[in-house]
Amino acid sequence: MTTMLKTINFCCFGSLCRFYGLALLWAMLLLPSILSAQPAVGTSATWRRPSGCGLDLEVYFFDSVKSADCPLRFAKLDGGIARINPWERSNNGAMLQERIYSERDSAVAGMVIAEGFDGGGLQGRVPDFLVVRGHLFGMGPLPDSAVLLQIRLYSKDTHREGAKEAEATDTLVRIRKGEFQPLAGDRYDRYQEYVIVLPAWWSRAAASLQQRDHAGITLRWMGGERMALRSMVFRDSLGQVVRSQAPAWRSWREELVSWMESEVRARPKVAAAVMVQEIMGSRGGGLCDRWTTARWLLEWMVKDVRQLQGLPMEAEVEEETTWPLLPKGKAGR
């Protein structure tokens, strides 16, 4: 990698955030086995566009506020105590909120700490991943193999023809303590991310605009270890490439940046918005333009590449893109 971009964290409670510092997490690789990637169309890089519109939508454990930018929330939150994390900050420097769970923090082993889900907040977009963000507070008494969180994903199939009752589909995901252990030398207060590849049946149900209660989530804290949770995040494949913090995802991210650098060099008059349309396979409008996508972050990435190449952040004249749209039905996932 030859470039570094600014660190930007998403916040779904309002307007876009400005740059804060350098080094925008160039450590990201999306596993090919869980992507429906499309071949790159461009001049000189190997970038393969993954599916989706850069979906990146957080649902918080410390609050159930439902806003215009983030029309998703848990129907019920229980147990735990909200606090400010002094070591995690947003782009504007504000410390982030979270909720702590332990017997001394109003939680009981095995209790349901979050449940319910309004799929209408996804606005028809299909998520590929569910990312749990949280951290531990120290070594603790339990082994790394101990289950700390249990997530139930369920869906009621109300469309099965001739069925007298709705058919329930369930998946149980167990998250172990070792998944939240920090890397050597890192602070326990830093958020770790556990990525769940969502079952296709659940993703489709969650994205249904007709059945907003068609998919659900129940999360239990299993006890024995004090931990904090910030949020659950819904992402599609492109959103995971842009936003994931996992070091193992580096090569997909580097391919994207390499493609950006070559395109900016070959087409210095292309506008950031136009290049983002090419990355997303969209000419603007529709699902790809919602605030709950990574579109604005991709635009800042392109602008930073322009500056690093000695160009103004934005082109004075927008160049009309010739990048073809994906075939029908391929852009949603």
Image (tube, grey):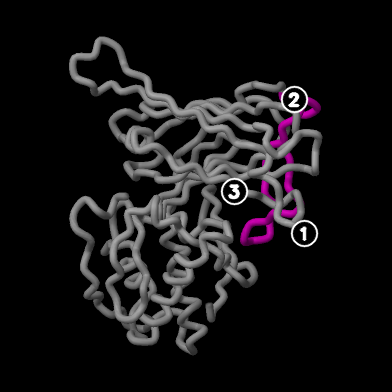
User: Which of the pair 234/47 is nearer the observer?
Assistant: 47
- Disc 1 to disc 2: CB gap under 8 Å: no
Q: Is residue 6 left or right of residue 155?
A: right
Image x and y of residue 222, in percent: 66, 26
Residue labelled with disc 1: 185
Are there few (<14), some (14-19), or many (20+) residues within 10 Å of tag 2? Answer: few
Above or below, 220 against 20 in this view is above
Q: Nearer the viewer, mark 3 or mark 1?
A: 1
Q: Is 100 colored magenta in this rendering? A: yes
Q: Nearer the viewer, mark 1 or mark 2?
A: 1
Image x and y of residue 232, in percent: 54, 41
Which element type, helix, strand or loop, lies under badge 3? strand
Question: At x 63% / y 43%, what residue is drawn?
Answer: 230
Residue labelled with disc 3: 193
Q: How far, Cα to Cα, is label 1 from label 2?
A: 30 Å
User: Which of the pair 327/255 is nearer the observer?
Assistant: 255
Q: Disc 1 marks which amino acid?
A: Gly
Question: At x 46% / y 85%, what residue is drawn?
Answer: 312
Question: At x 38% / y 24%, what residue is drawn?
Answer: 169
Q: Disc 3 marks which amino acid?
A: Glu
Q: Quadrant of residue 147?
A: top right
Q: Disc 2 marks which amino acid?
A: Ser
Image x and y of residue 82, in percent: 71, 36
Question: At x 75% / y 28%, what residue is drawn?
Answer: 224
Residue labelled with disc 2: 106
Q: How far, Cα to Cα, is label 2 from label 3?
A: 24 Å
Give the magenta part as a residue range: 83-107
